[in-house]
C-alpha cells in the first residue's frame, strides 16, 4: 500500500477571489512533503492562465489516517493565501456551499 504524506492542491480564482475551484494537479499525491514541495513550482507555473488567479500548496496528510475516510478543506484568504487541511471525515456530507464569509470568502 502506498504511503501518502502530502497532497498537491491547486486552486484557481476570479480576480476578486469570490469564486474559486480546485484545478487538477498533474501528480496530486506524494510519499513525502519534500517531493510535493519540489513539484509545486512546476505545477503552479503550468496552471497559470487556467484562471485569473492561481494558488498552490502542499497539504500534510497524517499517515495514521490511511485507513480512514478523509476530507480536504481549503480556503483562499482575503490576502490571497491558500490554506488547507486534511482531516478525518466526521460523517457529515456537504454537497456544495455558496456562502461567503467576511474573512474566508471561499470554503
Image: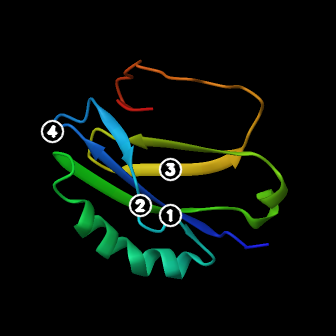
Q: Secondary structure at mark 3?
A: strand
Q: CA distance from mark 4 to mark 1?
A: 25 Å
Q: Please tell me which residue is depicted at 65% across the width and 61% down the height of the picture.
A: 61
Percent across and percent down for residue 76 are 36, 42
Mark 2 and mark 4 lie on one chain; the one further toward the N terminus is 4
Residue shown at 29% from the left, 46% from the top: 12
Colour scheme in use: rainbow
Q: State the residue in front, 17 or 104.
A: 17
Q: Marks 1 and 2: CB-CB under 8 Å?
A: yes
* Residue at image mark 1: 28
Quarter of the image with the C terminus is top left
Question: Which residue does the numbered mark 2 point to in the structure image?
Answer: 25
Q: Secondary structure at mark 2?
A: loop
Q: Looking at this view, is 91 or 77 the one in front?
A: 91
Looking at the rendered structure, which numbered label has been put on residue 84?
Answer: 3
Q: Is residue 51 above or below residue 58?
A: above
Decide if residue 63 is on the left or right side of residue 17. right
Q: Secondary structure at mark 4?
A: loop
Element on which disc 1 rests: loop
The residue indicated by pointer 4 is 15
Amino acid at each position: 500500500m502506498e504511503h501518502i504524506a502530502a497532497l498537491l492542491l491547486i486552486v484557481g480564482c476570479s480576480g476578486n477571489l469570490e469564486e474559486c475551484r480546485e484545478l487538477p494537479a498533474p501528480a496530486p499525491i506524494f510519499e513525502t512533503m519534500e517531493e510535493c514541495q519540489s513539484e509545486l513550482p512546476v505545477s503552479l507555473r503550468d496552471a497559470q492562465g487556467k484562471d485569473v488567479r492561481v494558488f498552490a500548496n502542499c497539504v500534510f496528510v497524517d499517515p495514521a489516517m490511511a485507513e480512514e475516510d478523509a476530507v480536504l478543506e481549503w480556503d483562499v484568504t482575503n490576502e490571497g493565501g491558500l490554506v488547507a487541511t486534511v482531516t478525518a471525515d466526521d460523517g457529515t456530507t456537504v454537497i456544495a456551499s455558496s456562502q461567503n464569509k467576511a474573512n474566508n470568502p471561499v470554503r
